[in-house]
Amino acid sequence: MEDYERNSNSPTHHEEDSDVRKGPWTEEEDAILVNFVSIHGDARWNHIARSSGLKRTGKSCRLRWLNYLRPDVRRGNITLEEQFMILKLHSLWGNRWSKIAQYLPGRTDNEIKNYWRTRVQKQAKHLRCDVNSNLFKDTMRNVWMPRLVERINAQSSPSTCELSESMITDPGQRVDEPSPVEPGFLQFNPIHHDQQLVPAAEVSAASSNSPAETLSDVVVNGSAGYDPIGQTGFAGFNDWGCVGGDNMWTNDDESLWFLQDQLLSHETTSYSYN
DNA sequence: AAGCTGTCCAACCGCATACTC
DNA sequence: TGAGTATGCGGTTGGACAGCT
């Protein structure tokens, strides 16, 4: 915020630009925007931008609201279940971030996009393969996603949450379009893995009084303390089921060597790559 | 302590699509 | 129906920060 004030007074801040503010939002701006959205709703962003007195574009207001000010924005680390969902949905839809975000309650497309770029692509880089290659996709499906499943199941009570391997590999679970929502539907119920996925917004609209019925609620609330490596250095598995932070590949039973073995075994058996 | 490097994430930009007149 | 405008989406950038040397 102070940086913004500094920037806005910088010599490079030309007079013709001063009509439109850019850069980080101030608390005052946030308060104004929240107030206006509460009155006018979260639409007609250009109108909000003009009538609020904010010297921001409608696009900027919209982005600020969706990614930060919206009351249901979820903060904090991406959970194991969310990681699993991201991997799974990305394998179906690719970089359709907004679509993927619909299935992760409270997460924004921006956040998911950032997660993918900073974490997932980093792993691809470590393995010296392209993130879009069949090799990497196979590794995700055959190594990392099963590891995530194991860890999710290990974290949770078997009676309440049991992820199935078929959630990873069953092509019949392709998610093209959401199905109609039934009351109380779980958007990601590991027990009923044959169900279709439903965007979180639709679930909350259909079942607003059962907020605990999400996978995150079922599992994560019972797994306090999960702290992905790379964020704080928690001494345990990182996001990818391997030990260590940046040095994640060096010192455990699921080291880079393990993954490379997996890759090599794939390379030498049944896979052909682009 | 200072400089360097890598990571994370908020915010911007450009383009595509939807909407309105 | 076409032009202008608004909105949404994905890609990219830049600053803050932490860790390392």
Image (cartoon, coloured by chain):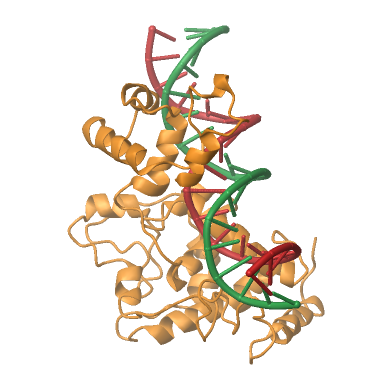
Chain colours: A orange, B red, C green
Could you say which is closer to the camera, residue C16 or residue A223? Answer: C16
Could you tell me if residue A91 is visible in this image? no
In the image, residue A267 above or below residue A159 = above
Residue at x 58% of width, y 29% of height: A13
Q: Is residue A201 left or right of residue A104?
A: left
The residue sitting at the bottom extreme is A253
In the image, residue A82 above or below residue C16 = below
Could you say which is closer to the camera, residue A93 or residue A171? Answer: A93
Q: Is residue A133 left or right of residue B11?
A: right
Could you tell me if residue A206 is visible in this image? yes
Q: Is residue A55 left or right of residue A242?
A: left
Q: Quadrant of residue A28?
A: top left
Assign the C terminus of chain A to one quadrant of the image.
Answer: bottom right
Q: Position of residue A123 (x, y in %)?
A: 67, 69
Count of labels in the image: 0
Q: Is residue B15 left or right of residue A202?
A: right
In the image, residue A269 above or below residue A75 = below
Could you say which is closer to the camera, residue A122 or residue B5? Answer: B5
Residue at x 79% of width, y 65% of height: A273
Residue at x 59% of width, y 24% of height: A14
Assign the N terminus of chain A to one quadrant of the image.
Answer: top left
Residue at x 42% of width, y 47% of height: A67
Q: Position of residue A64 (x, y in %)?
A: 41, 41
Q: Position of residue A237 (x, y in %)?
A: 54, 83
In the image, residue A204 above or below residue B15 = below
Q: Position of residue A50 (x, y in %)?
A: 37, 22
Could you say which is closer to the camera, residue A154 or residue B14? Answer: B14
Q: Quadrant of residue A119?
A: bottom right
